[in-house]
Amino acid sequence: MTTSLEKDDSEAADTSFFQRLTQLLGRWGVETHGIAPIPREERVDSRIYQLFLLWLSSNLNVTNLVIGAGGPVVFKLSFLNTAINLLVTDALSCIIPAYFAIFGPKLGTRAMVQARFSWGVYGVAIPSILNVLSMMIFLFFNVIIGGQMLAQVFNHLTPAAGIIIIALVSLAVSFCGYRILHWFEAVAWIPTQIGICVMLGVGGRHLASAPSYPAPTAASVLSFAATVAASDVSWCTMTPDYGVYHDAKASSLRIFTYTYLGLFLPSLILHIVGAAFAAAAPTVPSWNTGYDQGNNLGGLISAVLQPTGRFGQFLVVLMALSISGPSAPMMYSFGISLMNVSSVFTKVPRYVYAIIATGICIPLALVGQTRFYAFLVTLIDLIGYWCASFSAIVLTEHVVFRRCDLARYNVEDWDQPRKLPPGVAALLAFFGSSALVVPFMAQAWYVGPVAKATGDIGLLVGFFSGCILYGSLRPLEIRLLPGRGR
């Protein structure tokens, strides 16, 4: 039987091992900071433009082609209707994550740590867990696409092997942390930009030959908009994470503008390009075969670039590897969010969670690669529902109860439960708005009674009901527990 003394010695040894390893990795440039807010004196990096480059790389990526392709492939919208839908939806939905980015440099807090000022120390475990799952889902799709692309180039490389390669490249970047992430994202967008330009040059003449589609219905338009908005809004749980070392004195407008442009411009461009090629694919036999009814984006890209020979294959490889652009930040935020669930998880260094995320996403991707689109739309929409309610609660706290005044956040209280809101209002508002979403959601496995007539408007309902419920419940919480988090 293990004695308590032996157990204590074992725990001390483990702690000592992690401490020594962390110190060694820190000397090598690996980020070793946990989730504690970054002190103001350390928030001095004046390169605010890095926020633009990071989100440019995360969105100027072939994975975003899939979202745009959903218009013609899943919702049977013409290219014109898809493009108009994308312009309006991307322009509006990128506002929320861009605004959240302000909290990073100004408060030095990661997204889920900042959420404690409305959800409380214990209540924030709910969105933190959901964010861990969301990061894993996005990783799942990213590595599948990258694996498919690599398998198209190398005859003896299976999609499974390609999935493992993409996951390991993403791990290498995420493991190193904040500064290496920003360095990598500054250049990761370039291969995809070149590849997209070549694709348009080679395949552009076929894009005008897209087949005709039936007149759009309100349900199909709104349901597609919901999927696009969900993919955009979900960044709000990450955008503050990548500005915590940047200049606290930078203007909020500058932070917002760089982030908004980094989200909106590449998202819109890649969404529209994806819609254009997906709409035209049925009219080009080689494209249609490669695309495999929407289940193999790598096959479509390879088919489009086939006339360029080995140069096209080289571009496919570079574009596949650049999928690490969005994947590495997702691995990073996976660990940050998990550490925010409970103080128990903070005892394990951040870089260990990057390894854990890799170990989870690889087997999931190997299993799920055969029914790509069937999983994609459903899971992205589900992420959008909860992110809409989450962002509504955080924004209502910030705008209504703290009057957009960052000085009203006493960041030193970030881990003091009695000095933060109890989180009851946030939890009740979240579960209440989530329940209200159900009649308005439209998925392959369930269509709510209202959504049968309107299409999927669950994300809008989740956001506005979250605002109303939290705005109504928070004053009661303040009255019953005065002084908590004000």
Image: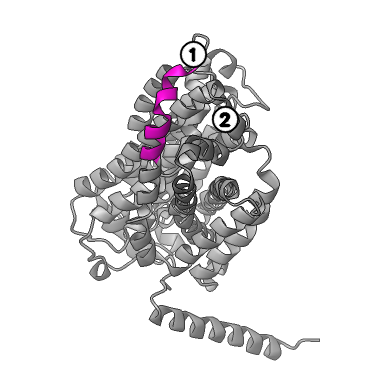
- Magenta stretch: dominant SS? helix
Stretch in magenta: 196-211
Taking depth in this image into account, of 148 and 246 the one nearest to the observer is 148
Which residue corresponds to the image point at 40% horizontal and 79% vertical from the top-left? 28
User: Which residue is under mark 2?
Assistant: 286
Q: Are marks 1 and 2 in contact (CB under 8 Å)?
A: no
User: Which residue is under mark 1?
Assistant: 218
Q: Residue furthest top?
A: 215
Q: Vertically, is 120 above or below 416?
A: above
Q: Vertically, is 64 above or below 340?
A: above
Q: Disc 2 residue type?
A: Ser
Circle 1 packing at 10 Å, graded few (<14), some (14-19), many (20+), is: few
Q: Position of residue 457 (x, y in %)?
A: 50, 24
Q: Disc 1 residue type?
A: Ala
Q: Position of residue 22 (x, y in %)?
A: 47, 79
Q: Position of residue 323 (x, y in %)?
A: 47, 50
Residue 462 makes an appearance in the image: no
Distance of mark 1 from mark 2, alpha carbons? 33 Å
Taking depth in this image into account, of 65 and 357 the one nearest to the observer is 65
Nearest-to-viewer mark from 1 and 2: 2
Residue 445 makes an appearance in the image: yes
Taking depth in this image into account, of 283 and 276 the one nearest to the observer is 283
Circle 2 packing at 10 Å, graded few (<14), some (14-19), many (20+), is: some
Q: Is 20 in the magenta? A: no
Q: Is 198 in the magenta? A: yes
For label 2, the SS is helix
Q: Residue furthest right?
A: 1
Q: Quadrant of residue 14?
A: bottom right
For label 1, the SS is helix
